[in-house]
Image (cartoon, rainbow, N blue to C red):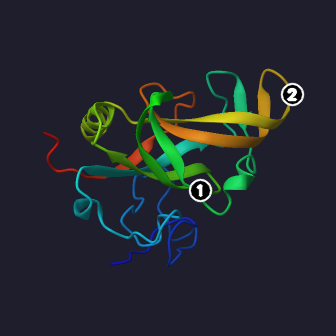
Amino acid sequence: MERAVCGELFEPRLSDEQCPSTGSGRTDITAKGASTGSARTDSPSEIPGTLRFAGYAAIFDRIDRGGDIIRAGAFGDLAQGKSLPLLWQHDPMQQIGRVDFAREDRRGLRVIGTVSTATRAGREAAALLSGASVKGLSFGYRVKRAAGEKPRQLLDLDVAEISLVTLPMQQLARVHRVEGLADLS
């Protein structure tokens, strides 16, 4: 069943006036069309050993712990949505799933992903995410265009991966909704 949600990720769309405030945690991650990599519309309960989440990997116009500010438009190459690897703590040897959807909206880089429990790192990440012990999101990137220093304004980025992390560079880069995996044993 499709449900109306805020933003540009799902159909039918709601206007900004109809949407709850950003960061409310009301992102619908079971709506059809969330995956850009395939036509899969299975709910999390239909995909054994997975946990789905939605949140923001970056927030615009906020200085991060490294002294950078990401500006709107920096994720332009993700405008059509893009599937990316989901890593545990930015470790390329610990891919724990995939980000099915990553797209810039008016708030930042909105992501919807799936954590797989097929690996030890995936099981650990799913358990911590389900228990709300880890909610941080981050991303690995290459700077294509920037301006200024202290703070540096990031204007064009090439995103390579999204990570579930303990301590995000941007304090507001967080998972807002988690669904699936009733049993993590």
Q: Earlier in the sequence, mark 2 or mark 1?
A: 1
Instruction: Tell me the tag on residue 82.
Output: 1
The foreground one among 72 and 34 is 34
Which residue does the image show at 35% across and 32% down from the upper left?
134
* Relative to 46, 4 lies left or right: right
Q: Residue at x 65, y 42 (%)?
A: 159
- 41 horizontally vs 79: left or right: left
Instruction: Tell me which corner region of the image, top left, top right, bottom left or bottom right, holds residue 61.
Output: top right
Would you say 31 lies left or right of 183 here?
right
Q: Which residue is mark 2?
A: 148
In what element is the residue under mark 1? loop
Q: Residue at x 54, y 48 (%)?
A: 84
Q: Quadrant of the N terminus?
A: bottom left
Tally the marks.
Answer: 2
Nearest the eye: 70 or 123: 123
Q: Which kind of residue does numbered mark 1 sit on?
A: Lys
Q: Residue furthest right?
A: 148
Horizontal and vertical percent position of residue 160: 62, 40
* Residue at 38% from the left image edge and 70% from the top image edge: 41
Residue type, numbered disc 2: Gly
Q: Residues within 10 Å of mark 2 (few under 14, many from 20)?
A: few
